[in-house]
Image: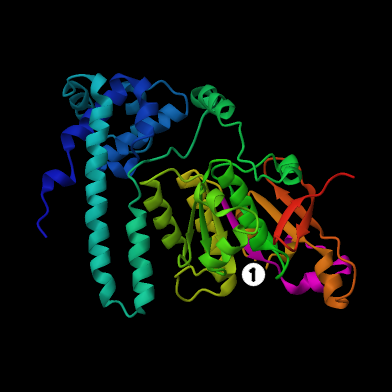
């Protein structure tokens, strides 16, 4: 493979970025959203960039004197070429107005270097002593690691960002409603970037509730991706037809995927669909049927890896992800069988990663197990056991056997 050096780096563009940051410090905030230390190929430029951003974040005026002082304290001034090299960077700059263009060139070169490194790593995978599915998993992870080339700043300052964030909060104040009033009353709805865990014991109706919420959102005009690892597409459509006509379902923007059993496969599919149309909400049914694709992990570590990847996917793709999860058997031995956060099966870091945790409880199911002739009223509870944004509580619902779905329980 022939690699052209001019595609790997541009010392002139790197110098242009650094010169712009010194001559026009107000552009540093914008540069930070585009580049990081590794964007620069030349080590001396990495050092200078780090010093300039350190000064900027600390609120220290950025100029030649403050940069020289910072480099001296770090014993780096002579290593980068001294004051003469700093002056050379500034003198070689035609105009600081082109800072964003220079940054774009530097970013392009970084992406090309990352691409070459990734291709080299992928080329070695077929020679590793791994099973074919593990090799495929590694290729997928490396390919997804390239991302879209966008860099999100990892920090914010009150001085620079408060006004912008406050405006965005006002714009984004509308939450995505679940369509079940008693749940929305407690959590307001769900938000992009959140991981929502919907958990329960077998036969409690996890799939029924998640598909109901998905249908409610789709009916409201949202685009849904539903990763179903337990039920088939036919089974889900059959359930949906108990509540909606064929004509109604055809108008809903719902995509069902049956085989994406790793976070990488799911993220890849989400990005593929996003090239066609918007994706508003993702649902995963369910965590314990997924694989992390990582070798030599115990099940608890594997589930932790999966939940963490899903949380990061929610943030990176700016969508809410509803993930279903099993609860352990401790619920069965408890009086009234009421679930708790600690009942999350193979929990690992699920509770930690989740923004909202909802636990389904249907005492009817236990009564039916003990006495098939016992009266059933369908009373159900969704226990909001964790809500990072606000209050917790219990949403009262009713399960309708004939339609395999949930409805809000009236106050009376």
Q: Secondary structure at mark 1?
A: loop
Q: Residue 17 lies in what quarter of the image? A: top left
Segment colored magenta: 321-341
Horizontal side of 172 relative to 392 (left or right) equals left
Q: Which residue is mark 1?
A: 346
Q: Find residue 331 and report its image quarter.
A: bottom right
* Residue 384 in view, yes or no: no
The colour scheme used here is rainbow
* Percent x, y of residue 95: 21, 19
Q: Position of residue 266 (x, y in %)?
A: 45, 59
x, y percent for residue 270: 43, 53
Q: Is residue 61 left or right of residue 340?
A: left
Residue 42 vertical placement versus 71 (above, below)? below
In this rendering, the count of numbered labels is: 1
- The residue nearer to you, when weighing 107 against 403, is 403
Is 98 or 67 nearer to us in this picture? 98
In magenta segment, residue 328 = yes
Residue at the location (11% across, 60% down)? 1
Q: Is residue 162 magenta?
A: no
- Residue 88, image x, y percentages: 18, 26
Near mark 1 (Cα within 10 A), the count class, few <14, some 14-19 or many ≥20, is many
Does 398 sit left or right of 166 as displayed? right
Residue sitting at 74 percent across and 51 percent down?
407
For the C terminus, the quadrant is top right
Q: Is residue 346 above or below residue 33?
A: below
Given residues 282 and 304, the one toward you in this image is: 282
Residue 3 makes an appearance in the image: yes
Q: Residue at x 66, y 50 (%)?
A: 356
Looking at the picture, tell me which residue is in the foreground, 106 or 189: 189
């Amino acid at each position: 493979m022939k690699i052209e050096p001019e595609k790997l780096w541009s010392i002139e563009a790197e110098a242009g970025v650094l010169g712009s940051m010194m001559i026009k410090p107000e552009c540093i905030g914008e540069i930070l959203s585009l580049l990081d230390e590794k964007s620069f190929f030349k080590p001396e430029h990495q050092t200078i960039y780090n010093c300039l951003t350190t000064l900027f974040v600390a609120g220290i005026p950025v100029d030649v004197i403050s940069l020289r002082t910072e480099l001296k304290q770090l014993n780096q001034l002579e290593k980068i070429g001294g004051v003469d090299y700093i002056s050379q960077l500034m003198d070689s700059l035609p105009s600081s107005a082109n800072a964003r263009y220079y940054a774009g060139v530097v970013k392009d070169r970084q992406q090309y270097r990352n691409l070459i490194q990734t291709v080299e790593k992928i080329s070695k995978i077929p020679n590793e002593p791994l099973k074919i599915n593990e090799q495929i998993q590694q290729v997928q992870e490396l390919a997804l690691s390239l991302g879209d080339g966008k860099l999100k700043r990892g920090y914010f300052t009150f001085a620079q960002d408060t006004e912008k964030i406050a405006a965005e909060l006002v714009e984004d104040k509308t939450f995505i409603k679940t369509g079940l009033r008693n749940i929305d009353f407690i959590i307001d709805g769900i938000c992009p970037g959140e991981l929502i865990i919907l958990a329960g014991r077998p036969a409690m109706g996890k799939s029924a509730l998640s598909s109901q919420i998905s249908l409610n959102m789709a009916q409201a005009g949202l685009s849904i991706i539903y990763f179903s690892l337990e039920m088939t597409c036919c089974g889900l459509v059959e359930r949906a037809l108990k509540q909606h006509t064929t004509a109604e379902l055809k108008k809903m923007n719902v995509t069902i995927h049956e085989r994406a059993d790793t976070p990488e496969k799911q993220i890849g599919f989400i990005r593929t669909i996003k090239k066609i149309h918007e994706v508003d909400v993702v649902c995963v049914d369910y965590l314990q049927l997924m694989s992390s694709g990582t070798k030599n992990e115990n099940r608890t570590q594997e589930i932790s890896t999966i939940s963490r990847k899903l949380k990061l996917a929610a943030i990176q793709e700016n969508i809410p992800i509803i993930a279903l999860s099993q609860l352990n058997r401790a619920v069965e031995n408890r009086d009234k069988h009421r679930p708790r956060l600690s009942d999350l099966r193979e929990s690992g870091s699920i509770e930690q990663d989740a923004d909202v945790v909802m636990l389904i409880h249907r005492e009817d199911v236990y009564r039916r197990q003990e006495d098939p002739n016992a009266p059933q009223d369908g009373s159900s509870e969704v226990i909001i056991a964790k809500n990072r944004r606000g209050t917790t509580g219990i949403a009262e619902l009713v399960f309708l056997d004939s339609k395999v779905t949930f409805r809000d329980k009236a106050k009376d």
